[in-house]
Image (tube, rainbow, N blue to C red):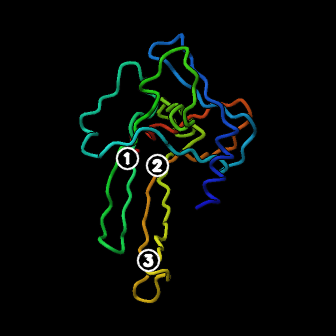
Amino acid sequence: MLGLLLALLGCAANITVHSMESSNPCVFQARAAKDFAVGEVVLIPHGPVHDFSEGAKMRRPKSHHPQHPYLVTTEIGAYDICDDLSKYIIQSPLAQFKPGKALGVSPFWAVLEATVADTTVGNLEARCLTQEISCEFKQDGRKQRGKDKAPTVTILVPAFVNVKAVMRGAVFVAKPAAIQNM
């Protein structure tokens, strides 16, 4: 898990987010600050988390461009305990963007969706990352052993992964319909 986190932080450090404030609604762009090989870019969302039931009430504000992701679902659960996942909604922090403010958002939210039906357009593809974490804990100062093995928590997170090499300065664009399918 730590290795994945460090890789994601290193990836995000080499991507800049720009805003095209003259357009209405405002368009954001995630641009490569260095060259990336295929599969080297993995963008995950972070932002306000809401209960899944609130998602139906949340509407895309007019200030949020339709070519950007707005809401994504993430799931967390323990398969070996109840075989059930709890769903949560992560909302784009760009929904509350005010022109002139500094951008400190995850590049995930600034990815544009290709509007052309051509599947060769776009350098990113939407995928679901799965991470399993062992919830090991000590009871009476001793580690769990044998049949009392610690449960595994599974986290499913939407992500964008580059399926083409990306040159420095290029804009990150998701393949058509990738954002709607998240």
Secondary structure beneath dot 2 equals: strand
What amino acid type is highlighted by mark number 3? Ala
Task: Examine the rendered structure and indicate whether residue 5 appears above or below residue 84.
Answer: above
Task: Examine the rendered structure and indicate whether residue 63 appears above or below residue 160.
Answer: above
What amino acid type is highlighted by mark number 1? Thr
Residue at the spot 33% in from the left edge and 73% down from the top edge: 81
First-in-chain label (1 vs 3): 1
Q: Residues within 10 Å of mark 1 (few under 14, many from 20)?
A: some
Residue lying furthest top in this view? 22
Mark-to-mark CA distance, 1 and 3: 26 Å
First-in-chain label (3 vs 2): 3
Which residue position holds label 1?
73
Residue at the spot 41% in from the left edge and 44% down from the top edge: 182
First-in-chain label (1 vs 2): 1
Which residue position holds label 2?
158
Q: Quadrant of residue 33?
A: top right
Picture coordinates of residue 39, whole percent (x, y): 64, 51
